[in-house]
Amino acid sequence: MALYKYLRKHWQSDSNDLERQRMIRWRSEPVTLKIDYPTRLDRARSLGYKAKEGVFIVRQRVPRGGHRKPFPSGGRRSAKWTTRKSLMLNYRTIAEQRAADQYVNCEVLNSYEVGKDGQSVWYEIIMVDVSHPAITSDPHFRWLAESRGRPFRGLTSSARKSRGLRHKGMGAEHLRPSRTANKKRRLLQQK
C-alpha cells in the first residue's frame, strides 16, 4: 500500500478518545482558523492541495441544526415573518462561503470534513491566494485567478452537488440543469 492509503486507513480507524480530545480542543478555537498543515493529508492532496506558497488551509466550524432564515428585526408585514424557509445549502457550502468571507483576496479550491459532534461540524477548506506570484505562474492553479467568488456562485464541488450537477448514472434525461433543455438539444441533434 502507498503512504496515502495508510493515512486514509488510519483516519478511518481513529480511536474515539483521540477524536473526542480533538473536538474538545477545536471547540475552544476560533470559528475560522488558518492552520499550518492539513489534518487529513491524504484527502487534501486528492482534492488539489500542494504545500507551496499561496496555498493554505482554513479550518471552519459550522453549527449543526436547521439553517433557517433569521427572524426579521422590523419593517415587515407579519405574514412575511416566517423563519421556516430553510437554506438550500449543505454545511460544507456554508463553511466554504464563511471562509471566503474571511479571506476576501483568496479563492476556495475545495474542502473536506474533518470532524463532527453534537453541536458543530468542522471542515478544512483549501484556499488559494490568486494574486501570489507562485500561483499565477503555476498552470495547476492559474485558472482560479479568472473565476472570482466560486462558493457564492455555486461553482465549488459541494455547491454543484446541492445544485444537482454532480449526479451521474441515471442517463442524460435525469441530469440537471434542465430535463427540457436536454430534450430540446437531443431533438435538434436528430434533425
Image (cartoon, rainbow, N blue to C red):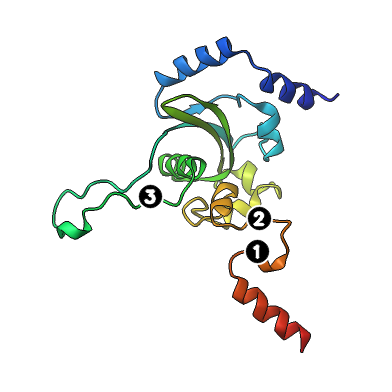
- The image's mark for residue 36 is none
- Answer left or right for 130 relative to 41: left
Q: CA distance from mark 3 to mark 2?
A: 22 Å
- Answer left or right for 107 relative to 81: right
Secondary structure found at label 2: loop
Q: Are marks 3 and 1 in contact (CB under 8 Å)?
A: no
Q: CA distance from mark 3 to mark 1?
A: 24 Å
Amino acid at circle 2: His
Vertical arrangement, residue 160 with respect to residue 50, above or below:
below
**Farthest residue toward the right?**
1
* Closer to the camera in the image, 100 or 95: 95
Q: Residues within 10 Å of mark 3 (few under 14, many from 20)?
A: few
Which residue is painted at 66% across and 55% down in the image?
167
Please state the horizontal and vertical placement of residue 121, each as a whole percent of the image: 48, 30
What residue is shown with label 3? Answer: 86
Secondary structure found at label 1: loop
What residue is shown with label 2? Answer: 167
Vertical arrangement, residue 20 with respect to residue 139, above or below:
above
Which residue is painted at 68% across and 23% down in the image?
12
Q: Are marks 1 and 2 in contact (CB under 8 Å)?
A: yes
Please state the horizontal and vertical placement of residue 143, each as a whole percent of the image: 64, 54
Q: Residues within 10 Å of mark 2 (few under 14, many from 20)?
A: some
Q: CA distance from mark 1 to mark 2?
A: 7 Å
* Closer to the camera in the image, 163 or 180: 180
* Closer to the camera in the image, 49 or 134: 49
Amino acid at circle 3: Ser
Q: Of the residues under marks 3 and 1, which one precedes in the sequence?
A: 3
